[in-house]
């Protein structure tokens, strides 16, 4: 006997088991609790939907239909093995079933034949509908079977249950055939093996984001000296390495040809910087190609460097 975990905890359990989970609308508060209690919980019940197409299936299981309002389960397991959570709390999935079956689930003993419909199953079972026509011909892809195994194991692991707490609708209520296409005995065998493997590895923690790269710093006074003294010819000693940062910014601004990016504040760079000053609205001696604080800071803000005096 167990009380249900919180909705957020259920999502954590499923994802820790390696499942892809889609949360549909306000599923955490979508339920039939006004019609009766949800819990104590004793097991997991597996169904097939008799529908085709994931979107249609999820919509029906969430909203229900005339005479049977939704949610019709807690989660829909589609053909790709994705779990779509559509409700949490009491859901219209199990209906009335056999009290001897419930007793066997509680005690985790062999299931008797279901020949009565006298006990409220919606109160005591998680319900998962699996997208399948239920005609014996519609295939059950391995991804979908694996998801059923994982969903069941995750919930059993949380409550301390064995695989015997997982049953099919056909084992609960007389006249039902779901799930059709595999046996619950074979599914319980899979769940048992998964549970025997121990707890799933905890999800790897998200790596801490790397700090943003540090912006290069350009010294205005040293840059001005380079602009006034650098030789015109390429290949002579570089007077200040910050020149290359500024030249790269001028290249990005479309004002300096890339081959001129040579760390020399020569004629081509002076001309390019003058064009940058004119772009900012400077004229005359204020656009002579010798950097000033205002124009250099603007260049740095746009192209990724800081300026010191």
Image: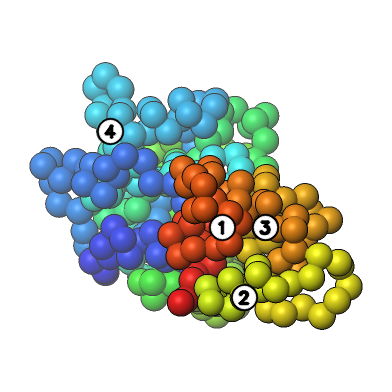
Q: Is residue 106 above or below residue 137?
A: below
Closer to us: 51 or 188: 51
Mark 4 and 1 residues: CB-CB less than 8 Å, in contact?
no
Q: Residue at x 22, y 43 (%)?
A: 31
Q: Residue at x 56, y 33 (%)?
A: 132
- Scheme of image coloration: rainbow
Q: Label 4 to label 3, Cα distance in Å?
A: 74 Å
Q: Is residue 132 above or below residue 166?
A: above
Q: Residue at x 47, y 47 (%)?
A: 282
Question: Between disc 2 and disc 3, whose residue precedes?
Answer: 2
Residue sticking out furthest to the left: 34
Crowding at mark 3 (Cα within 10 Å: few <14, some 14-19, many 20+): many
Q: Secondary structure at mark 4?
A: loop
Q: Report which residue position mark 4 lands on.
A: 70
Crowding at mark 1 (Cα within 10 Å: few <14, some 14-19, many 20+): some
Disc number lying in front (4 or 3): 3
Q: Label 2 to label 3, Cα distance in Å?
A: 12 Å
Residue 14 point in image, percent of width and height: 45, 61
Q: Report which residue position mark 3 lands on.
A: 270
Q: Secondary structure at mark 1?
A: helix
> Is 18 displayed left or right of 11 in the figure?
right
Q: Quadrant of the N terminus?
A: bottom left
Question: Between disc 2 and disc 4, whose residue precedes?
Answer: 4
Q: Report which residue position mark 1 lands on.
A: 303
Residue 24 point in image, percent of width and height: 36, 41
Q: Report which residue position mark 2 lands on.
A: 225
């Amino acid at each position: 006997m167990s009380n249900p975990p919180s909705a957020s905890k259920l999502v954590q359990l499923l994802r820790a088991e390696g499942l892809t989970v889609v949360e549909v609308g306000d599923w955490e508060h979508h339920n039939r609790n006004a019609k009766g209690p949800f819990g104590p919980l004793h097991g997991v019940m597996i169904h097939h939907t008799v529908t085709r197409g994931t979107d249609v299936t999820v919509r029906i299981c969430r909203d229900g239909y005339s005479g049977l309002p939704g949610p019709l389960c807690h989660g829909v397991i589609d053909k790709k093995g994705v779990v779509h959570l559509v409700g949490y709390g009491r859901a219209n999935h199990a209906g009335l079933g056999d009290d001897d079956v419930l007793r066997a689930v509680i005690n985790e003993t062999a299931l008797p034949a279901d020949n009565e419909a006298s006990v409220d199953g919606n109160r005591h079972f998680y319900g998962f509908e699996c997208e399948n026509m239920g005609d014996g011909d519609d295939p059950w892809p391995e991804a979908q079977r694996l998801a059923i195994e994982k969903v069941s194991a995750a919930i059993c692991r949380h409550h301390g249950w064995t695989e015997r707490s997982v049953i099919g609708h056909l084992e609960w209520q007389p006249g039902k055939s779901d799930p059709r296409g595999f046996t619950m005995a074979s599914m319980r065998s899979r769940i048992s093996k998964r549970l025997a493997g121990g707890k799933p590895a905890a999800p790897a923690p998200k790596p801490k984001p790397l700090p943003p790269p540090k912006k290069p710093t350009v010294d205005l006074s040293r840059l001005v000296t380079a602009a006034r003294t650098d030789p015109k010819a390429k290949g002579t000693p570089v007077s200040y390495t910050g020149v290359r940062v500024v030249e790269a910014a001028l290249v990005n601004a479309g004002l300096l040809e890339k081959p001129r990016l040579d760390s020399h504040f020569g004629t081509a760079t002076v001309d390019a910087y003058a064009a940058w000053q004119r772009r900012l609205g400077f004229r005359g001696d204020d656009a002579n190609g010798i950097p000033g604080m205002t124009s250099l800071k603007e260049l740095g803000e746009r192209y990724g460097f800081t300026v010191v005096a």
